[in-house]
């Protein structure tokens, strides 16, 4: 009888021990699951798979190639609407968009907000649209993914993925923009790409990074949607975007400038019309344009009239070509001779050569700099306007302004 009671007591203790142990394990498992949920952003996101998310989001992310800037973008609406940062397309009304399949299209900037660093580009091809998540859905320390193309054309291949944790938000009261702060280390070129949660929902647009401090900054999804509505309703949605004018019959300089601007915006037929028979030599448009098919962009660095030879235009320019999946940069300098034929200025004969082993000084117009330096020496009190005079002289349409006119404009701008 005593043995039987002892066995019952032992069994009871054993069962209690098992229940206590199971309770401890379940509690530990629950805590681990809770930590995983917190890391991913809650129980709804625990079923999302990072690999699938990255593959899906990559189909919506593009490379954005501007004249001076390069970055990333992503599809936010049907009919080819792409969102990017304003600083990526600054000074570029017709950026080239490299699609995930490595083809490219010429985009048109249709809306922009410089203060919020946002711009919307339209292309003819639809891409899978990414959905937005509210800022309130992000949990403390939630893991986020930033996707884009770092270092512009210097790295080829698929879009890059940076992983990091959400830290906090910060508000720019002056411009009404809310930012996400993360512990990601971002590099140049990833700007304009999406920052997404584990399920691929957009929580922000990659905007800036402090590489040494390991901080990644994004304009929040809430601010994006708010600014998008304001841009859409604005009477001047393009007030911050550089306007490109075409006046090829104004003078020889404008004829050459228009030729390169037509190449930039991919109006190839218009560019071909500015070429004289002397240059084309009987070749058809289809034959001529073949050599420009890989060209993403051409940017005039310096253009001016030759002071000794009439109707000769001196130029320095850069080009970007898409060769397979790599962007190739080239630089050229030389001149075009321009002639007026049947009332139109046409490009008659070029002497353009590729320049390699560039030095920084190549980008400067030393003739103009020396002229301004001499003007400063002869005009007391004009020293403070020297730098502004040079910048104004490089603006389109100001290449042939006199030094007195440059000085006057510089004083007005100050």
Image (spheres, rainbow, N blue to C red):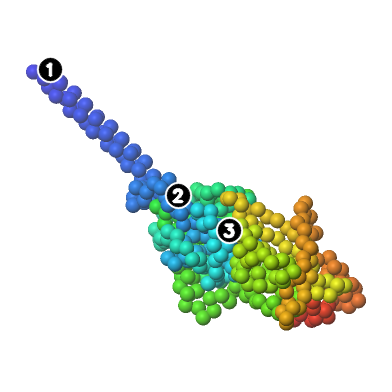
Q: Is residue 208 visible?
A: no
Residue shown at the point (79%, 55%) measured from the top left: 359
Q: Nearer the viewer, mark 3 or mark 1?
A: 3
Left or right placement of residue 321 versus residue 221 in this view: right
Asked if disc 2 and disc 1 are in contact, CB closer than 8 Å, the reply is: no
Which residue has dot 1 on it?
3
Judge by depth and name the residue closer to the eye, 179 or 404.
404
Which residue has dot 2 on it?
54
Residue shown at the point (55%, 59%) measured from the top left: 104
Residue shown at the point (29%, 38%) measured from the top left: 26
Distance Cα–Cα, label 3 vs label 1: 81 Å
- The quarter of the displayed image where residue 4 is located: top left
Dot 1 lies on which element?
helix
Q: Earlier in the sequence, mark 2 or mark 1?
A: 1
Residue 187 image offset from top left, x and y in percent: 60, 52
Which residue has dot 3 on it?
71
- The quarter of the displayed image where residue 129 is located: bottom left
Residue 227 image offset from top left, x and y in percent: 49, 70
Residue 184 image offset from top left, x and y in percent: 54, 50
Dot 3 lies on which element?
strand
Distance Cα–Cα, label 2 vs label 1: 65 Å
Residue 412 image offset from top left, x and y in percent: 75, 81
Left or right placement of residue 122 versus residue 189 in this view: left
Q: Residues within 10 Å of mark 2 (few under 14, many from 20)?
A: many
Residue shown at the point (39%, 58%) measured from the top left: 137
Q: Earlier in the sequence, mark 3 or mark 1?
A: 1
Dot 2 lies on which element?
helix
Q: Earlier in the sequence, mark 2 or mark 3?
A: 2
The image shows residue 367, relative to residue 140, as above or below, that is below
Q: Residues within 10 Å of mark 1 (few under 14, many from 20)?
A: few
């Amino acid at each position: 009888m005593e043995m039987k009671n002892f066995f019952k007591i032992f069994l009871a203790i054993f069962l209690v021990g098992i229940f206590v142990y199971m309770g401890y394990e379940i509690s530990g498992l629950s805590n681990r699951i809770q930590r995983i949920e917190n890391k991913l952003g809650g129980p709804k996101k625990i079923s999302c798979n990072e690999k699938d998310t990255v593959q899906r989001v990559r189909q919506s992310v593009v490379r954005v190639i501007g004249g001076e800037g390069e970055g990333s973008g992503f599809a936010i609406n049907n009919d080819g609407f792409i969102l990017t940062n304003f600083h990526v397309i600054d000074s570029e009304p017709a950026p080239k968009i490299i699609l995930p399949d490595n083809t490219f299209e010429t985009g048109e900037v249709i809306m922009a907000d410089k203060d919020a660093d946002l711009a919307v580009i339209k292309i003819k091809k639809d891409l899978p649209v990414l959905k937005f998540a509210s800022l309130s859905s992000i949990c403390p320390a939630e893991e986020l993914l930033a996707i884009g193309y770092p270092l512009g054309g210097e790295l080829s291949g698929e879009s890059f993925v940076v992983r990091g944790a959400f830290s906090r938000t910060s508000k720019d009261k002056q411009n009404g923009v809310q930012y996400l702060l993360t512990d990601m280390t971002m590099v140049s070129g990833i700007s304009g790409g999406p920052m997404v949660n584990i399920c691929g929902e957009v929580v922000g647009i990659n905007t800036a990074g402090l590489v040494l401090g390991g901080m990644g900054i994004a304009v929040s999804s809430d601010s994006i949607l708010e600014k998008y509505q304001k841009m859409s309703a604005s009477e001047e949605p393009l007030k911050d975007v550089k306007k490109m004018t075409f006046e090829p019959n104004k003078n020889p300089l404008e004829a050459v400038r228009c030729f390169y601007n037509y190449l930039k915006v991919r109006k190839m037929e218009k560019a071909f019309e500015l070429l004289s028979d002397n240059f084309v030599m009987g070749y058809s448009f289809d034959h001529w344009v073949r050599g420009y098919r890989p060209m993403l962009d051409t940017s005039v660095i310096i253009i001016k009239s030759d002071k000794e030879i009439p109707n000769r235009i001196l130029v320095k320019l850069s080009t970007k070509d898409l060769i397979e999946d790599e962007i190739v940069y080239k630089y050229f300098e030389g001149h075009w001779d321009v002639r007026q034929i049947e009332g139109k200025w046409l490009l008659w004969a070029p002497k353009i050569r590729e320049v390699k082993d560039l030095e920084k000084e190549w980008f400067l117009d030393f003739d103009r700099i020396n002229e301004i330096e001499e003007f400063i020496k002869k005009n007391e009190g004009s020293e403070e306007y020297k730098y502004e005079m040079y910048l104004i002289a490089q603006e389109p349409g100001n290449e042939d302004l006199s030094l007195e006119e440059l000085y006057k404009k510089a004083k007005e701008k100050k």
